[in-house]
């Protein structure tokens, strides 16, 4: 993603986990593109699949279907640095 970095923009690559069989191709694409941040979708499944995602050396976000404080805390505990959500009750949640 050099073109993005040349513009001073942060590159976030989204990993949509619909099928386990697509994970290898998605991880290969991420390795080639070298994003600044990885976002796992749907984020609510991150605690169950984090062991399938190799460490890419970039921060990881989790987004999608995270609706409760417990789910948000679980994705943080699984290694995400943050949660992206449109669920307003979670916006002011302190996960630190």
Image (cartoon, grey):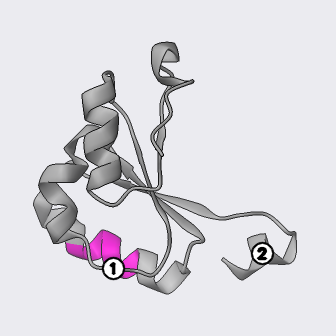
In the image shown, does 77 or 33 lie closer to the viewer? 77
Above or below: residue 89 compared with residue 13: above
Above or below: residue 84 compared with residue 50: above
Q: Position of residue 81 (x, y in %)?
A: 47, 56
Q: Position of residue 74 (x, y in %)?
A: 25, 43
Return the residue found at the far top: 89
The answer to which quarter of the image holds residue 11 is bottom right
Chain part drawn in magenta: 24-29
> For the residues carrying marks 2 and 1, which lies nearer the camera in this image?
1
| Residue 54 visible (yes or no) | yes
Check if residue 78 falls in the magenta segment.
Answer: no
Q: Which residue is mark 1?
A: 55
Q: Residue at x 32, y 75 (%)?
A: 27
Q: Residue at x 25, y 30 (%)?
A: 70
Disc ID at residue 5: 2
Q: Secondary structure at mark 2?
A: helix
Which sits earlier in the primary sequence, circle 2 or circle 1? 2
């Amino acid at each position: 993603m050099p073109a993005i970095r040349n513009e001073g923009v942060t590159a976030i690559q989204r990993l949509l986990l619909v099928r386990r069989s697509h994970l290898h191709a998605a991880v290969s694409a991420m390795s080639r593109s070298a994003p600044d941040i990885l976002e796992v979708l749907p984020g609510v499944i991150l605690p169950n699949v984090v062991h399938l995602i190799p460490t890419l050396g970039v921060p990881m976000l989790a987004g999608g279907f995270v609706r409760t404080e417990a789910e948000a805390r679980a994705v943080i505990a699984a290694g995400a640095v943050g949660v992206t959500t449109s669920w307003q009750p979670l916006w002011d949640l302190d996960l630190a």
